[in-house]
């Protein structure tokens, strides 16, 4: 795979959650490949959502120190899409034109802004296209 791809928050959550080992393996592979190849892309929103979940909702929550290390090793190298007025305006356009939820429209807008061809997410419609971007559920 040589195309840039965007990882939704649920991919990171599954990569560290032992509840479903199959999903954990798939997600961990996507995260590891994303960091190593520099083809994985995430936005500020994904980092915020993941940190919230990891500090509160994991079976064994992460400590602040563990999360800080994970941030520098995994999240920061992929966090190439900053929050911006352009991102919000594109998300509003997508919400109106494509009838998608606000937070999903922010993720789609960030993936488009990042030049991604694939958006990996379990939360959106598999196969749905937004121009050159396609949603793929990696757990199917």
Image (cartoon, rainbow, N blue to C red):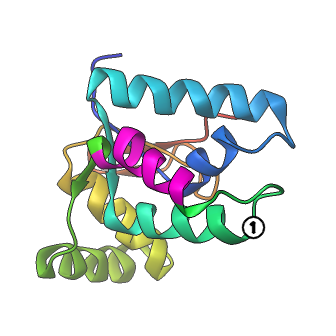
| Residue at position x 29%, y 64% in the image | 109
- The residue shown at (51%, 29%) is 30
For the N terminus, the quadrant is top left
* Magenta-tinted stretch: 65-76
Residue position marked by numbered label 1 in the rendering: 57
Asked whether, in this view, residue 50 is left or right of residue 72, the answer is right
Q: Is residue 32 depicted above or below 14 in this figure?
A: above
Residue 28: image location, x then y, percent: 59, 30
Residue at image location 74% in from the left, 34% down from the top: 23
Q: Nearer the viewer, residue 138 or 80?
A: 80
Which percent across, then down, holds residue 15? 64, 39
Q: Position of residue 51 (x, y in %)?
A: 53, 65
State left or right for residue 79 relative to residue 34. Answer: left
Question: Is residue 140 visible in this depiction of the protein?
Answer: no
Residue 53 percent across, percent down from the top left = 64, 66
Residue at left offset 75%, top offset 45%: 17
Q: Quadrant of the C terminus?
A: top right
Is residue 139 one of those drawn in magenta?
no
């Amino acid at each position: 795979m040589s195309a840039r791809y965007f990882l939704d928050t649920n991919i990171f959550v599954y990569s560290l959650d032992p509840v479903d080992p199959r999903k954990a393996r798939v997600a961990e592979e996507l995260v590891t490949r994303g960091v190593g190849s520099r083809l994985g892309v995430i936005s500020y929103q994904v980092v915020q959502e993941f940190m919230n979940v990891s500090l509160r909702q994991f079976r064994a929550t992460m400590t602040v120190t563990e999360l800080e290390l994970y941030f520098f090793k995994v999240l920061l190298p992929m966090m190439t899409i900053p929050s911006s007025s352009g991102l919000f305006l594109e998300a509003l356009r997508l919400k109106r034109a494509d009838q998608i939820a606000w937070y999903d429209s922010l993720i789609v807008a960030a993936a488009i802004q990042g030049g991604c061809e694939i958006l990996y997410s379990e939360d959106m419609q598999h196969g749905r296209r937004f121009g050159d971007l396609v949603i793929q559920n990696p757990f199917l």
